[in-house]
């Protein structure tokens, strides 16, 4: 993929997507972001880096060696998908995707998110 901005464009083309960010979970900083999910995407990205770090820490304490594919947070009007990137060039990053529950197909969105995630290179 040519750039992180191109990845954001592809993520926002998923039906029901209202916001997307590619985030460094160590710092909470969004390397790229786009859309208008009706809240501050930068703050949400930073806050969700705490979710990723907590899950990774818990997995380590439990001795689990699996990798996180994705984390789903379901709100009354939105889905928040966190896809942890696990390739050598993207280690330490995750995709944060916000979807409207009224217009998104969750299964299709997860499938398309996985496709975009596999193409990201930093």
Image (tube, rainbow, N blue to C red):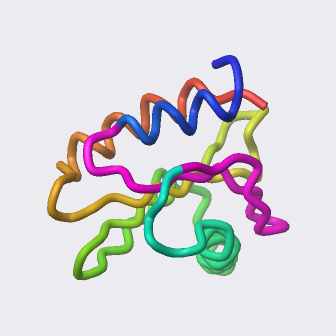
The quadrant in which residue 54 appears is bottom right
Tell me the quadrant of the picture where the C terminus can be found. top right
Q: In which quadrant will I find the N terminus?
A: top right
- Left or right? Give the position of 35 relative to 122: left
Which image quadrant is residue 57 in?
A: bottom right
- Residue at figure coordinates x 57%, y 24% from the top left: 119
Q: Residue shown at 59%/67% (left/top)?
A: 41
* Left or right side of 112 for 31: right
Does the segment drawn in magenta span residue 24?
yes
Whether residue 55 is visible: no
Magenta run includes residue 28: yes
Q: For residue 36, say whether it is visible.
A: yes
Residue 85 as seen in the image, left or right of residue 110:
right
Chain part drawn in magenta: 14-34
Image location of residue 19, percent across then percent down: 47, 55
Q: Is residue 22 above or below residue 29?
A: above
Q: Nearer the viewer, residue 105 or 66?
A: 105
Instruction: Please provide percent x and percent y for residue 42.
Output: 67, 68
In-front residue for pair 51/105: 105
Would you say the magenta stretch is mainly helix, strand or loop?
strand
**Closer to the camera in the image, 24 or 31:** 31
Q: Is residue 36 above or below residue 38?
A: above
């Amino acid at each position: 993929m040519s750039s992180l901005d191109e990845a954001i464009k592809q993520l926002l083309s998923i039906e029901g997507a209202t916001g997307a960010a590619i985030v460094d979970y160590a710092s909470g900083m969004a390397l790229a972001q786009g859309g208008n999910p009706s809240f501050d995407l930068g703050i949400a990205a930073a806050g969700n880096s705490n979710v990723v770090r907590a899950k990774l820490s818990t997995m380590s304490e439990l001795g689990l060696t699996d990798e996180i594919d994705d984390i789903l947070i379901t709100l009354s009007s939105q889905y928040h998908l966190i896809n942890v990137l696990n390739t050598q060039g993207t280690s330490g990053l995750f995709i944060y995707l916000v979807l409207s529950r009224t217009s998104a197909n969750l299964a299709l969105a997860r499938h398309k998110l996985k496709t975009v995630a596999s193409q990201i290179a930093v």
